[in-house]
Amino acid sequence: MSALFPALTNPSDRPALRFGPDVLTYAELGRAAGALADRIGGAGRVAVWATPTARTAVAVVAALLAGVPAVPLNPRTGARELAHVIGDSTPDAVLAGPEDELPVALAGLPRIAVELTGPAVAPPPGPVDPETPALVVYTSGTTGAPKGVLLSHRAVAASLDALAEAWSWTADDVLVHALPLFHVHGLVLGVLGPLRRGGELRHLGAFSTAGVARELGDGGTLLFGVPTMYHRLADALAGDEPLVRALAGARLLVSGSAALPLHDHERITTATGRTVVERYGMTETLMNTSVLPGAEPRPGTVGVPLAGVELRLVDEDGSVRAERDGETVGEVQVRGPNLFSGYLNRPEATAAAFDGDWFRTGDVAVREEDGGVRLVGRKATDLIKSGGYKIGAGEIENALLDHPGVREAAVTGEADPDLGERIVAWVVPLDGRKPPAASELVDHVAGLLAPHKRPRVVRYLDALPRNDMGKVMKKALPTTG
């Protein structure tokens, strides 16, 4: 039935999806998605109103079975951005739950209700070319209007299979998470991942430490989350023995979308004996690297390239940097079967994103002696040129987070007549009434890193601005402290 989902070829009564009271076996998923696939077959593209529900999963699986690209829509997107996504992707219909209230921007689209049931025997979809787009996922639009990233069936399969190899992910695994379903992390890894393996997904709907404890304690083996979720778990561990037992019993804890502070790593490992695995990917590349299970966490380290992924660091002058010294900074470029097929309707942007057949990620990193990648920030916002040095903001942020008085930290550069750029630290103290002194934080960083990497200015905030995926939006920081 599906090259992406072998488990749907011979549907069984094995559990596939659980979203609260909605539970589907592989046989039930096959019937519901197969019937919907038959209805939408031949469409150019379909939009999916991506709520954290079983209907979203059924809708996306149906589109993939039919060979119709799905455009997941963030239900929290503002009217202007939503209108742009619809106008750019021109879907033929929107798939949504019968009870979903859709915004005015979708009023002109035919609506197809997604049901969780189907006929006893659904018409089997035909074969799908691996290069057919599976998804059109829109970027966050931080550097202009959001771009539609074309992810093929080939890219999805290659990335999920590489992760399965790195994490020994099998049909016996039960994945627990509460990630949104309009993005790569929650949808591709978090829904399509377990379905490709023939395993089970239990989605919490909304994140809670109690939900994590309940589902991991009842047979869950994998947990996917973002740093804000793991921070809440770390905060709760001291007084929650069921949560400690649940995390300790999990086979794998995975964090992504942003760096997990070392302090949270340490608190979770001390309480549970489990290390949290970090990995590195982006919309255009899906997954590039992963820390291997059992490896000791290091700040900013996202592991080694996955099977099939080639990775290199490139200097601003175009030269490839082969050093594995933990210091030489370069832009991460990758190539492999995990790459996207291009930006929808944006041939110029697609061409500009590549250096030959290497994709320019815009991330800057260093390579460690063992080949591991340590991210130090984004080229556009996190590469600071100060006093003749190229400095990655990420390593300074990790050093600040190592201070016991720091809850959150972000680092930026601002113009300086002497240094070119000076390093500015934005700090959310653990105790807002008694923040650590600026001089103490400066000395702390200088003691962990080289002196030229110390902040020249420290500014205090109540919270850092973050997007839906937990990433800090540095352009939203105040222009003055």
Image: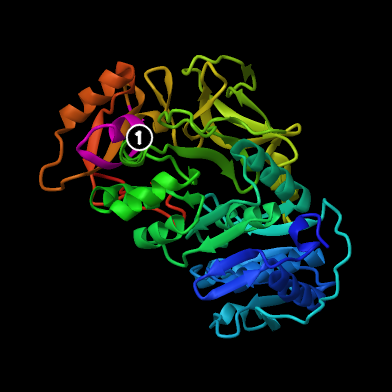
Q: Quadrant of residue 84?
A: bottom right
Specify the amino acid type for callout 1.
Leu
Q: Is residue 220 above or below residue 84?
A: above
Q: Disc 1 on helix, strand or loop? A: helix
Query: Would you say residue 406 sits in the magenta stretch?
Result: yes
Residue at 47% of width from left, 60% of height from top? 178
Residue at 15% of width from left, 41% of height from top? 435
Q: Is residue 39 above or below residue 199?
A: below
Say how many tags the image has. 1
Colour mode of the rendering: rainbow
Please provide the residue range marked out in magenta: 398-416
Query: Would you say residue 308 sits in the magenta stretch?
Result: no
Q: Is residue 444 above or below residue 161?
A: above
Left or right of 411 on screen, residue 481: left
Q: Quadrant of residue 387?
A: top left
Neighbor class of circle 1 (other Cα within 10 Å; few <14, some 14-19, many 20+) is some
Residue bearing mark 1: 262
Residue 301 location, x and y as percent? 47, 30
Residue 477 location, x and y as percent? 34, 48
Q: Which residue occupies the foreground of this view, 288 or 71?
A: 288
Residue at 85% of width from left, 72% of height from top? 42
